[in-house]
Amino acid sequence: MKAVEERVSDRRLLNMLRMLLSVGVMKEGLVRREVTGTPQGAPVSALLANVYLHQLDRAWCGGAGAGVLVRFCDDLVVLCRSRREAERALEVLTAILADLGLEPKAAKTRIVHLVEGGEGLDFLGFHHRWVRSESPWFRHVQFLARWPSRRAMQHVRDRIRELTGRDRLLVPIEVVVAEVNSVLRGWAGFFRYGNSARHFVTIRWYALGRLARFVAKKHQRRPAFGRWMVGVVSGNQLGLVDLSGIVIAPRPNKPWREKAERRR
């Protein structure tokens, strides 16, 4: 907080930040207040990151850095035209952060060359990779595709598994489905802007499988009973939200954001 106070002159803003830091966060019904730093997941974390790293943005815009800096809170990526420029950008970034008493996290810092068949990079939950069009009519087209990262996929699986766990067998099935739908809608609402159709199918099938197992365990029957109840008897798969047709995929060399606005 002391480092932030040196960069904020508005006393009202400082008082607000102090208040937000003292509020704490609720986890599993209990309020936790950190002694140092900010609680993970607290809204004030993003605000403090932007206040503290504003100096980095200004230095980069002022011409100190190489390439294009894209930053969201404490996650950032620098877009460069060559490896030499990328190495220079990393040197400058490290120097600027050092002046702020910070350093890039070694495990997450690397230089990636985006080429067809090469590796990709994860940023803000998406995996970005340079690919070639699969259409036989547009095989000559290459573009940067994006879809949910492995970590993002595992996160939503873990949440669905938690909601359909054995310890919740006394919870009404309609309540469980409503909670799973809420998770799927929120997750899909973020990842629908990308090349995510296949991943949405994977996650929905996973959710259906978990619901089938939940129904079977609830009635103390075999897994086949759960699949039969969900897929045949219910008629609408227990009301599980349908994720098909909601993905807005960017088109190569065309403004996909405008396309998204037209479809709303």
Image (cartoon, rainbow, N blue to C red):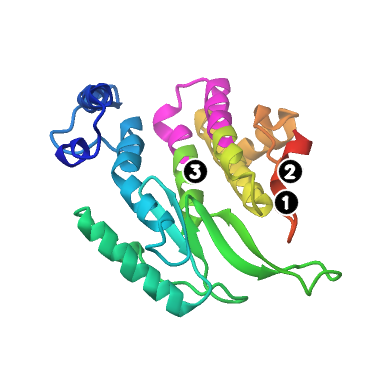
> Which badge, 2 or 3, is on the more N-terminal residue?
3
Nearer the observer, disc 2 or disc 3? 2
Q: Which residue is mark 1?
A: 255
Q: Is residue 39 left or right of residue 216?
A: left
Quarter placement of the N terminus? top left
What amino acid is at disc 2? Answer: Glu
| Left-right relation of 23 to 125 | left
Q: Residues within 10 Å of mark 3 (few under 14, many from 20)?
A: some
In magenta, the rendered stretch is 161-184
Instruction: Locate residue 164, reporting x and y percent.
Output: 48, 34
Whether pointer 2 and pointer 1 mark residues with C-beta atoms closer than 8 Å, the reply is yes
Q: Is residue 179 rendered magenta in the image? A: yes
The disc labelled 1 sits on which kind of residue? Pro
> Mark 1 and 3 residues: CB-CB less than 8 Å, in contact?
no
Q: Position of residue 240 (x, y in %)?
A: 65, 31
Q: Amino acid at mark 3?
A: Val
Q: Could you tell me which residue is drawn at 76 percent across and 70 percent down?
A: 141
For label 3, the residue is 156
Q: Which residue is mark 2?
A: 258
Q: Residue at x 61, y 68 (%)?
A: 130
Q: What type of secondary structure mainly makes up the magenta span?
A: helix
Q: CA distance from mark 2 to mark 1?
A: 6 Å
